Image (cartoon, rainbow, N blue to C red):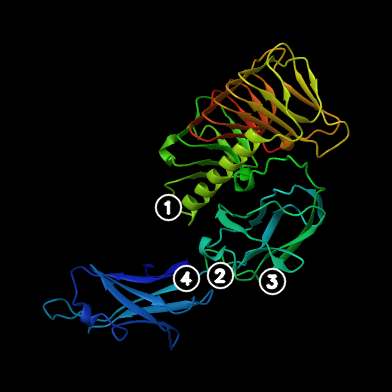
């Protein structure tokens, strides 16, 4: 491996030879297992396990060249019998396909970027995940590195800042030439782009931190019962639940995102990333639950048909949106924030009511529904905001949400053909 006359062999290939019987390991050495390019011997390490000898080059192979592997007659079995003849095979390495950065989020020179932004770069070809790390993907402010976590999935690298980014500042992101494709090709030049963070958020803005990358986050289960549900431009995560507890994907799909479970072996660091996200979600939940300035306005029962200004609203029991739509009016302030503190259950009822309407520049990303037990988003409801539920969240048939469904202790259920869109 690779086979004789193989082509398009990866530049970081470990060359293996498997014998018909167990060999004497002492005879499997750099003298009896060689690799050459033309007449030039390739430096590397030879090892033996079971019936397989492996040659690991010290440096990546060069592209688009023919290499020759040889096992000599001095390789012997446990009885001291050597190969009858030298075993020789050749292979050709892959022609160089240089990776490039196809797109970034935010785009270069973007403005009005959210302070809790996860910065992403999408590559032209699959990359070696081990080469996508804090040394090769950096975010800086005035030349100083920003603390955060780097992850990689599919062809997209993500940088999740540890804390909210500073308002009214220009940040610079860099993917360095250390980023390498799975075939062993590096970026030719550093890829650099910049963007500007938006105006300051409200003093009582709920900072989701690393939990903000998720459209769905649950503890015990995530299910799509029927239909072609979509989670768009956000990830899906479960912790401490396992990947087996995520069901119905497909037909449900995650667009421009990925599914992460606590038992995922790759990419490296998934379990730790999910633990941090759950910790950040808990802190956000507790902050929203305890927010007290400005003083919360008490509410109860059905909120359908009402229009609410920005602020903190508190229900000491359950809360409904049923008799009509609930309108949230930012009154011209794009940074206006709403926190709804709901002690028990929260339900929207489908049909003619139950929708959340935004006016006056209100933004779904600035709306937080802290639910003390479970939330149900009714049939065909058009809902806005981030739901932080203690127990569970259910989206009924046809419900569409611009926001996030985040659960601390239970499950998120999509009933049929639901959409979760990044706010």
Instruction: Say few, some or many: other residues with alpha carbon within 10 Å of mark 1 (under 14 / 14 to 19 / 20 or more).
Output: few
Q: Is residue 206 left or right of residue 37?
A: right
Rendered position, 160 above or below 380: below
Q: Nearer the viewer, residue 17 or 121?
A: 121
The part of the image, by quadrant, that contains residue 416 is top right
Quarter containing the C terminus: top right
Which mark, residue 265?
A: 1
Closest to the camera, between mark 2 and mark 3, is 3
Which mark, residue 370?
A: none
Mark sitting earlier along the chain (2/3): 2
Mark sitting earlier along the chain (4/2): 4
Residue matched to label 3: 189
Mark sitting earlier along the chain (3/4): 4
Q: Nearer the viewer, residue 217 or 207?
A: 207
Q: Which residue is located at x 52 percent, y 41 percent?
A: 237
Question: Are the two marked residues, 3 and 1, in contact with CB atoms closer than 8 angstroms?
Answer: no
Question: Are the two marked residues, 4 and 2, in contact with CB atoms closer than 8 angstroms?
Answer: no
Q: Which residue is located at x 16 percent, y 76 percent?
A: 77
Q: Is residue 324 left or right of residue 318?
A: right
Which mark, residue 95?
A: 2
Which mark, residue 12?
A: 4
- Tell me how far mark 3 sits from mark 4, CA to CA: 21 Å
Closest to the camera, between mark 1 and mark 4, is 1
Closest to the camera, between mark 3 and mark 4, is 3
Q: Which residue is located at x 31 percent, y 71 percent?
A: 17
């Amino acid at each position: 491996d690779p086979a004789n006359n193989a082509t398009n062999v990866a530049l970081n290939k470990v060359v293996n030879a498997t014998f018909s019987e167990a060999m004497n390991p002492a005879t499997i050495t750099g003298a009896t297992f060689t690799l050459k390019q033309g007449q030039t011997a390739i430096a590397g390490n030879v090892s033996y396990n079971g019936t397989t000898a492996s040659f690991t080059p010290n440096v990546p192979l060069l592209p688009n060249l023919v290499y020759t592997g040889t096992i000599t007659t001095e390789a012997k079995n446990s009885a001291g019998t050597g190969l009858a003849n030298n075993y020789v095979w050749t292979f050709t390495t892959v022609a160089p396909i240089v990776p490039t950065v196809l797109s970034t989020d935010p785009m270069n020179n973007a403005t009005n970027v959210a302070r809790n932004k996860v910065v992403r770069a999408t590559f032209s070809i699959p990359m070696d995940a081990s080469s996508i790390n804090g040394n090769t993907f950096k975010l800086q402010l005035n030349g100083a590195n920003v603390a955060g976590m780097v992850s990689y999935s599919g062809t997209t690298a993500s940088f999740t800042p540890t804390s909210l980014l500073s308002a009214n500042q220009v940040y610079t992101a860099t993917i360095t030439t250390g980023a390498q494709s799975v075939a062993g090709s590096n970026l030719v030049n550093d890829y650099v782009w910049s963007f500007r963070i938006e105006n300051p958020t409200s003093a009582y803005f709920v900072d989701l931190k690393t939990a903000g990358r998720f459209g769905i986050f649950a503890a015990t289960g995530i299910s799509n019962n029927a239909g072609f549900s979509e989670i768009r431009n956000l990830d899906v995560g479960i912790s401490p639940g396992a990947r087996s507890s995520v069901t119905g994907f497909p037909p449900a799909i995650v667009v421009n995102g990925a599914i992460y479970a606590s038992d995922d072996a790759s990419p490296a660091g998934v379990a730790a990333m999910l633990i941090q996200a759950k910790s950040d979600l808990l802190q956000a939940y507790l902050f929203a639950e305890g927010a007290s300035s400005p003083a919360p306005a008490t509410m109860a029962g059905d909120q359908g048909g009402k229009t609410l200004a920005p602020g903190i609203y508190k229900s000491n029991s359950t809360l409904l949106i049923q008799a009509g739509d609930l309108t949230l009016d930012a009154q011209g302030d794009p940074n206006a924030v709403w926190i709804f503190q709901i002690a028990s259950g929260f339900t929207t009822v489908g049909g003619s009511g139950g929708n959340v309407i935004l006016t006056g520049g209100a933004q779904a990303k600035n709306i937080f529904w802290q639910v003390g037990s479970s939330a149900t988003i009714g049939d065909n409801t058009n809902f806005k905001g981030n739901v932080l539920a203690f127990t569970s969240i259910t989206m009924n048939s046809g419900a569409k949400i611009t926001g996030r469904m985040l659960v601390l202790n239970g499950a998120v259920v999509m009933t049929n053909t639901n959409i979760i869109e990044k706010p």
